[in-house]
Image (cartoon, helix red, strand yellow):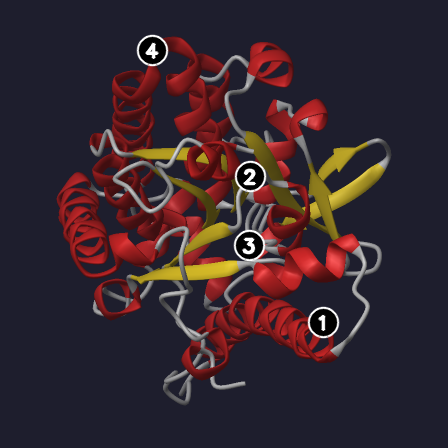
Amino acid sequence: MLEETLNALGLGGSRYKQLNLALQGGGAHGAYTWGVLDRLLEDDGLSFDTISGTSAGAVNAVAMAQGYMEDGTQGARAKLESVWKAISKAGDFLTVPGTSTSLMNWAMNGMMMMPFDPNPLDFDPLRKILKDQIDFAALREHSPFGLYIAATQVSNGSARIFSNEDLSLEVILASTCLPFFSKSVVIDGEPYWDGGFSANPAIRPVIFQSNTNDTLLVQISPVDGFQLPSHIGGVRTHLSHLSFSQSLRREIELIEEGRDISQSSIALNGKARRLARHRFHLIDGTAVTSKQNPGSEMTPDWSMLSTLFEEGRRGADQFLGDHRAAIQRTSSINLREHFRI
């Protein structure tokens, strides 16, 4: 692995750092993560091994991988920008009264029995954006990063984690599929919904399958501090937020329990040793995303996206200023304390 090679060359702890990335979902708020990635990619002392993404995090992951495959870090930054500009343009269309965003808002507020009934053609602008921007066949063969994409099996609520060899347009659409509006995405006969319901994002595959021991989690969905809803639409939105936040908290609980067992054991197998020595880092954008207007996750206007992008860059810049030295040395975040486990 790169980390061991650098240490052998006497470069361990130098400016050369490698990270895994774990990218949360959050709809249009994923533009904050775009800003984080843009700033990280700007730093020629960083490299990346494995990326786990859910929903908007999955879109960011494949956009970064596609661009990097085409033209290195500059290609990755350009592709991320291109994808988010396309999402914004689609949002401009969808905000026209009577079109899909209005229907989404009505569905979330309990004004329809079946939210996808008014969308009989199953229109999804993200499908065209991804089809135009991402070459999934090339990524399956030549992705510069290990990729793990989470979607939720409708039949049992379990997470399915798709890896490089599984990548397809349908996989990303499954990871982003909100049941309030879109029909489930069927893969191999199994219907799927948004991965945020079960893994937001999946972290354990990154720990056990990557070639480096440092994982940076980019958090854009709060895990607590929600206000008591006062109407049916607020209840539905709140239930979604709880599901998306608790899936991450459950995974952190499992990781921390495993680390406790691993660190207390005398004889450890390979997976236990890897878990015990893994180092975690965090960029928390929830102070920024939580200030956005209710429903803004579904309204990707360019003004908000640009603001979130700049805030994400600032968050990454602060992380690098405060914690660069910790990478490859020690965790810079106590997950148990941060997630109040």
Q: Secondary structure at mark 4?
A: helix
Q: Is residue 284 left or right of residue 100?
A: left
- Residue 341, given in percent of the width and then of the height, sits at 54, 85
* Tag 3 secondary structure: loop
Residue holding disc 4: 71
- Residues marked 4 and 1 touching at CB (< 8 Å): no
Q: Would you say the residues marked 4 and 3 are in contact, meaning their CB atoms lie under 8 Å apart?
A: no
Q: Nearer the viewer, residue 305 or 119?
A: 305
Amino acid type for the residue under numbered disc 2: Asn
Looking at the picture, how far across and down is residue 248, in whole percent?
Answer: 56, 66
Mark nearest the camera among 3 and 1 is: 1
Q: Which residue shows up at 58% across the image and 16% down it?
A: 136
Secondary element at image label 2: loop
- Going by the numbered disc 3, the residue's amino acid type is Pro
Q: Residues within 10 Å of mark 4 (few under 14, many from 20)?
A: few
Please state, as top left, top right, bottom left or bottom right, where the N terminus lies in the image: top right
Q: Nearer the viewer, residue 33 or 335?
A: 335
Q: Earlier in the sequence, mark 4 or mark 2?
A: 4
* Residue 267 shows in the view: yes
**Residue 179 showing in the rendered view:** no
- Percent x, y of residue 288: 22, 64
**Gap between marks 4 and 3 measured at Cα:** 27 Å
User: Contact (CB < 8 A) between labels 3 and 2?
Assistant: no
Amino acid on which disc 4 is placed: Asp
**What is the crowding at mark 2: few (fewer than 14 residues within 10 Å), some, or many (at least 20)?**
some
Q: Amino acid at mark 1?
A: Ser
The numbered disc on residue 201 is 3
Q: Pointer 2: what residue?
A: 119
Q: Earlier in the sequence, mark 2 or mark 1?
A: 2
Give the labeled residue for mark 1. 262
Q: CA distance from mark 4 to mark 1?
A: 41 Å
